[in-house]
């Protein structure tokens, strides 16, 4: 049987690739500390569950394809609270931020078009781009320079007459990079200069740890017609399983095209939309508490990494991830070895190997992404396991 070139070109998720090995490790009696996937353990606000319990319709009917007004209005009010004015027509509800990304790329990219993306990047960006036939043009960063990419010269070095858009996450996944307002302004000006779309994945907006104001590319009115915001309740409210996201833009023609795809998939889940709308009414101190908790976790992981000889990393400014270069020959081989051959008092650890976060072959071989989504005590143990594992792995490879 034949399979499409698109399917064969796409890679497995580095976050989920080693799940079968983790299952076997657990069956063998090991405890696995999961740092591989961005699934927070912070409790989802009770308002979500209360809204579900309060649903008393006789039929769970299709929702409107653009999204339910109760949720669209809640999102518009949220943006108004951070100083950005969006009308309901500017918002389309999607099945998670992933569908929003997929629809956005499908609307603006053709086969052979180029998409600028700083690497390392969220691997699904590559998958969605490949589905359109577009080519990812990476801006290469390194652990030695703190994965910094917001320089005009770097952007200019990869733009061509085939470039159609720049895609970035801010705060960043997997590096935790946070752009300054001046850097965002430079990217906006670059997009105007080269007539590019800006796809701004801002699902981690609340998770910044330097006291910054919440920022968005939606603030720049002079590029409103070329900005596509991607947002979600998954990380913001620790509601990943709700699968509620949105695509936001003031470009009317773009949104008309995007609506075609929303109609084709009929609608987003009704109950999850109702419950997610309720999340936007949480008390203001919710985010302060969550930020403080993630900052503690970030500081714990970064401090522990700094104590491991040969590790190269920078302190991330936001999100809840950190990329690090390890003193090992191959992070994928190392991860497999940790699950199959290593344990300390019955414990082992799991992360996301870095190779699949890069478009350039050969890059990221010894890098990993850590999601600091466990409680501090568990993170301390996980990082100690990582240190012990590195030492044992390199000793047996001598």
Image (cartoon, grey):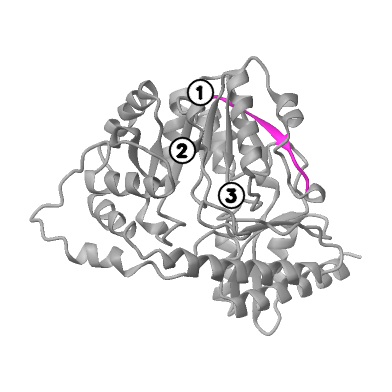
- Residue at x 31% of width, y 55% of height: 276
Q: Earlier in the sequence, mark 3 or mark 1?
A: 1
Q: Residue 8, percent across and down?
A: 57, 34
- Confirm whether residue 3 shows in the render: no
Residue where numbered disc 3 is placed: 171
In the rendered image, residue 256 lying in the magenta stretch gets the answer no
Q: Nearer the viewer, residue 164 or 111?
A: 164
Q: Nearer the viewer, residue 216 or 357?
A: 216
Residue where numbered disc 2 is placed: 229
Quadrant where the C terminus sits is: bottom right
- Alpha carbon separation for disc pair 2 and 1: 16 Å
Q: Secondary structure at mark 1?
A: loop
Residue where numbered disc 1 is placed: 109
Query: Mark 2, residues whose alpha carbon is within 10 Å: few (<14), some, or many (≥20)?
Result: many
Name the image quarter holding residue 137. top right
What range of the chain is rendered magenta? Answer: 133-142
Q: Earlier in the sequence, mark 2 or mark 3?
A: 3
Which-is-in-front pick, marks 2 and 1? 2
Q: Nearer the viewer, residue 69 or 308?
A: 69
Whether 306 is drawn above or below 114: the answer is: below
Q: Nearer the viewer, residue 312 or 7?
A: 312
Left of 237 or right of it: where is 318?
A: right
Q: Residue furthest left?
A: 58
């Amino acid at each position: 049987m034949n399979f499409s070139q698109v399917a064969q070109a796409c890679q497995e998720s580095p976050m989920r690739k080693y799940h079968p090995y983790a299952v076997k490790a657990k069956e063998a009696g090991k405890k696995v500390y999961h740092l591989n996937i961005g699934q927070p353990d912070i409790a989802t606000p009770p308002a979500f569950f209360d809204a579900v319990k309060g649903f008393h319709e006789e039929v769970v009917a299709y929702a409107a394809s653009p999204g339910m007004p109760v949720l669209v209005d809640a999102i518009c009010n949220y943006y108004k609270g951070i100083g950005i004015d969006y009308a309901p027509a500017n918002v389309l509800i999607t099945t998670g931020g992933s569908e929003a990304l997929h629809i956005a790329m499908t609307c603006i990219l053709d086969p052979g078009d180029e998409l600028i993306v700083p690497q390392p990047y969220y691997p699904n960006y590559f998958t969605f781009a490949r589905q359109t036939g577009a080519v990812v043009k990476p801006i290469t960063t390194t652990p030695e320079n703190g994965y910094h990419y917001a320089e005009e010269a770097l952007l200019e070095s990869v733009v061509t007459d085939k470039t159609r858009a720049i895609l970035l996450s801010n705060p960043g996944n997997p590096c935790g990079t946070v752009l300054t307002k001046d850097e965002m302004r430079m990217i906006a000006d670059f997009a105007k200069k080269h007539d590019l779309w800006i796809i701004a994945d801002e699902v981690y907006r609340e998770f910044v740890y330097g006291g910054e104001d919440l920022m968005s590319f939606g603030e720049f009115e002079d590029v409103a017609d070329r900005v596509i915001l991607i947002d979600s309740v998954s990380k913001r409210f620790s509601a990943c399983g709700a699968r509620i996201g949105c695509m936001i833009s003031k470009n009317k023609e773009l949104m008309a095209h995007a609506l075609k795809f929303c109609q084709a998939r009929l609608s987003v889940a009704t109950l999850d939309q109702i419950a997610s709308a309720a999340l936007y009414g949480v008390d203001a101190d919710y985010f302060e508490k969550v930020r403080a908790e993630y900052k503690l976790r970030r500081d714990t992981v970064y401090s522990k990494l700094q104590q491991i000889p040969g590790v190269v990393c920078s302190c991330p400014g936001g999100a809840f991830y950190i990329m690090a270069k390890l003193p090992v020959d191959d992070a994928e081989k190392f991860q497999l070895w940790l699950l199959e051959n290593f344990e300390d008092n019955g414990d082992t650890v799991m992360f996301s190997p870095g190779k699949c976060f890069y478009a350039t072959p050969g890059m990221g071989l010894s890098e990993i992404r850590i999601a600091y989504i466990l409680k501090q005590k568990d993170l301390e143990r996980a990082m100690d396991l990582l240190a012990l594992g590195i030492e044992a792995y390199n000793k047996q490879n001598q």
